[in-house]
Amino acid sequence: MSGYIPKPNTGSLFPNSGKEEPKQPDLTGKINLTKELMKECMDATPDGELVVMDVSGWHNANNRIGLSVKKHYVKPTYQKTAEPKPAPEPEDDDSDIPF
């Protein structure tokens, strides 16, 4: 055993040393996802739609690609609110006029 403890929500891809046919993948590997991330992504996805996650990759030592997985980021959309209503002008108070 190597004693390597994988970090949550990360993985690695390695060159496929057993590739014998062109249809086989060039890279293979594993990804280690926490149940919390999986649940968060599942809960954020409407029924019948695909669960989307963001994946990032880096070239690392030993000719491998390190991966990081996060919940898919969706840029918030802001609805334009109606123009603020102007404050009503105060009514003229004629009570102090002497006529």
Image (cartoon, rainbow, N blue to C red):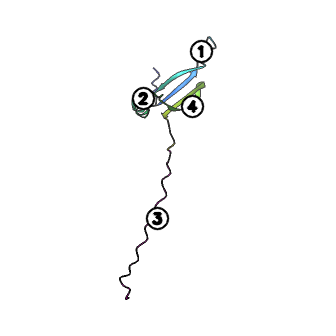
Q: CA distance from mark 3 to mark 1?
A: 67 Å
Give the number of the disc on residue 47: 2
Q: Residue 53: where, in percent of width, then height?
A: 49, 32
Name the foreground residue: 70 vs 41. 41
The residue mark sitting in front, 1 or 4, is: 1
- Please, what is the three-letter code of the amino acid marked with disc 2? Asp
The residue mark sitting in front, 1 or 2, is: 2
Residue receiving disc 4: 57
Give the number of the disc on residue 88: none
Check residue 86 for magenta coloring.
yes
Left or right: 26, with 46 as reference point:
right
SS label for mark 1: loop
The residue mark sitting in front, 3 or 1, is: 3
SS label for mark 4: strand
SS label for mark 2: loop
Q: Earlier in the sequence, mark 4 or mark 2?
A: 2
Note whether 16 is above or below 36 in the view shown.
Answer: above
Q: Few, some or many C-alpha atoms within 10 Å of disc 3 (few <14, some 14-19, many ≥20)?
A: few
Q: Residue furthest front?
A: 99
> Principal SS element in the magenta part?
loop
Q: CA distance from mark 1 to mark 2?
A: 32 Å
Q: Few, some or many C-alpha atoms within 10 Å of disc 4 (few <14, some 14-19, many ≥20)?
A: some
